[in-house]
Amino acid sequence: MVRRKRGRDAKATQEPKAVSRPQATAKPEPLSTSLRLPKGAIKRINIGQSFAEYDAALNDPSIYVHTPALESALDPESGKVFFVGRRGTGKTAVRKYCEMNGDATRVIVPEIFSPSSTLQEVELLLNVNQKPFRSLVSAFRRALQVEIISLRQQNRPGQHRTPVDVQAEMESFGSMDFDMRCLRIISRISGALADGDDERWLTENKIARKVADGMKDMMSNDTAIHTLLIDSIDDYWEGSDEGLIYLTAFMHACQEISSQIPWARAILFLRENIFERIRALDTESSRLETAVVGMEWNERQLMEVVEKRLNRNLTAKFALQGATWEAFFEHPDEAWENVLTYCQRRPRDILIYTSNAVEAAQGAGHEKILLEDVQQARRRFSDNRFRDLGDEYSENYPQISVVLSRFYGLGNSFTFAAVESLIIKLLKDPEVIRLCGEWLSVNSSPEKFIRLLYDIGFVGIRAAGKSPKFRALGPLDTSPPPVGDTTDIVIHRCYWDALDLQDALVRHVPDEVEFGKIGKIEDLPGGLDQTEYVEHVEMLLDELKDIKLGVPGAQDFEEIVGDVIRLCFFRALENVEPRSRDHEGRVIRDWVASNRASGGFWEAMRTRYGATQVIWECKNYTELHADDFHQLSYYMSDFGGGFIVVVFRGEMKPSYYGHIKRIAMHNKGFVLPLNEKDLMVFLRQARNGKIKEDHIQDKYDSVIRKLS
């Protein structure tokens, strides 16, 4: 990570203080019996991927920890529909477990929550009790009901009679994908409302209830629960007012279906920062909150997460509840206190920290994980957490890592007055104003700024004579302690190393002190600085909307795709070459990039398909043809590998899956279609500072599920 010189006079405004060590909760009781590892056990440890979407270990049901959230997801009688928590708290893992163990499940990744337009004025949709909003709820309910009926017909073909109203709805919308179905039904209901046609509006609106009644009549001795698992909402959601209203209506529809149709559930996995915005918007949010389960973890469950993974490759496994940890760590109590102090009670944090310590022990050739290995992992973990924090809240506060980086080299705690002077300096920083000015100006009062930092988990609030209080993981504890002249803020311990914070209380940040800076997006392509990078991405977003279809815009579209590769995937794909020919000069590929990923999605593609080179083919038209897929199959080779991305301007069609399956069977490779919407997602995430590969992973997973 690139670091720049910190302010020269920072120490002059800080006072050393005694830092109270965060208190760890009760640890598992140490065992009196001496536990010995098999020889070479440390070398064989495989913690697995800390990001659930990439973690092959989650295919093993025994690796899961049975938290209250997991039990609620499997229990249709629990009444829980919304699983809310911060990133890394296990939402995707719960979804995967439900896929493996539910009666009949289907995963949906909706794109509808980033609408380009609405048929009603936004102001008319704000009242959740009025016709415009209820029309949205009815439309989403109908779309979900069709999806559930389709899932039932797929899993129980020909076993049940279909009521007339249900059959009519399936004939109208059953062949559409989920997003197109939503748009079509919303158009019909909202169109009637906009036209003032009350009779047509009532007719369309009542269909949801009639179909639900028909679904109840389909009940039989078969008690299987059919469940829709809705995940990755933030992939397409831009945080606009329209998208927020759509998502709120969607949540009401999920709850109504789950409570009114005995054999159906619609479960939604949602980040807590998005849920907080919905709670602020929805005057009827108390109804939704009765169906919410938080993703909180206690200390025993967090240790079990690690212990099950430490045990995975052992023939004779150690007991849980502390015995496995004691077997692997030289000073188990102190090591666990280190890990727990630095992590924010999230399973992902625990896995990342432990994995870093394991790698340190493996690199040093230790036969047991020593305390020095745990401490050595601290800096790497801190850097990771700082990057991940900026990424997690990029949709709410674009480029928030730029503001957080201005704490670099200062103290680990600030008085209320120091926060005031810090805000004044931030508002004079040209880079901060250019990248973060829109949201920072709204939160420029000390109270709002502290609340923002508290909400994202960056700081805790400390009243005089008390320990600092940090934000809980789930939606249950959302109110910070009171903030006033006598309170301080304390930066969470996990960020101290990444920001090189001094052990000092900052009472004032003078104007003449230079801000230290820490690079959020390191080694930017083309020698761009962060402001230039964002400006270039914004320019591409504008240009992509205006490219003409077909031959007139083909060259422009191809150039935009090349820029997307360079700007959005530069950490994994390097040496991007345009119009690449093979050695015989016959086969021309639009773009070829070297795959040098050390983890995540692209590393998995290299392992699975030998994709040392990734080919990107550009088709500036809306519909792919058999000849296009035939052409792509020629690009695959033993030398470059068998993974190709084809970018086009239309929507996926059922016929494409047959071509992809044929290529997978005959060429042992894979073609991943992406469209214009996907390019917009990649660019929007890059603009906001989001660096994860979850969107392209979801697109790949979606195609794989269709093929299987």
Image: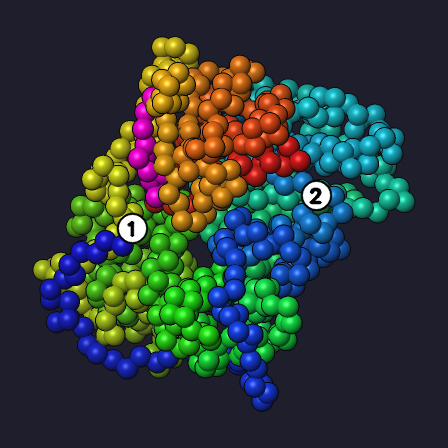
Location of residue 62 by image quarter: bottom right
The answer to whether residue 215 is magenta is no
Q: Quadrant of the C terminus?
A: top right
Q: Is residue 205 left or right of residue 588?
A: right
Q: Position of residue 223 (x, y in %)?
A: 84, 47
Q: Amino acid at mark 2?
A: Thr
Q: Of the residues under marks 1 and 2, which one precedes in the sequence?
A: 2
- Examine the rendering and report whether any part of residue 346 can be seen: no
Which stretch is magenta? Answer: 566-579
In terms of depth relative to the viewer, which is nearer, 212 or 152? 152
The residue depicted at 62 percent of the width and 21 percent of the height is 655
- Residue 520's disc is 1
- Examine the rendering and report whether any part of residue 352 can be seen: yes
Q: Position of residue 663 (x, y in %)?
A: 57, 26
- SS label for mark 2: strand
In terms of depth relative to the viewer, which is nearer, 657 or 469? 657
Q: Is residue 586 left or right of residue 412?
A: right
Q: Quadrant of the N terminus?
A: bottom left
Q: Amino acid at mark 1?
A: Lys
The residue labelled by disc 2 is: 105
Q: Position of residue 477 (x, y in %)?
A: 51, 64
- Residue 45's disc is none
How crowded is the residue under tag 2: few (<14 C-alpha within 10 Å), some, or many (20+)?
Answer: many
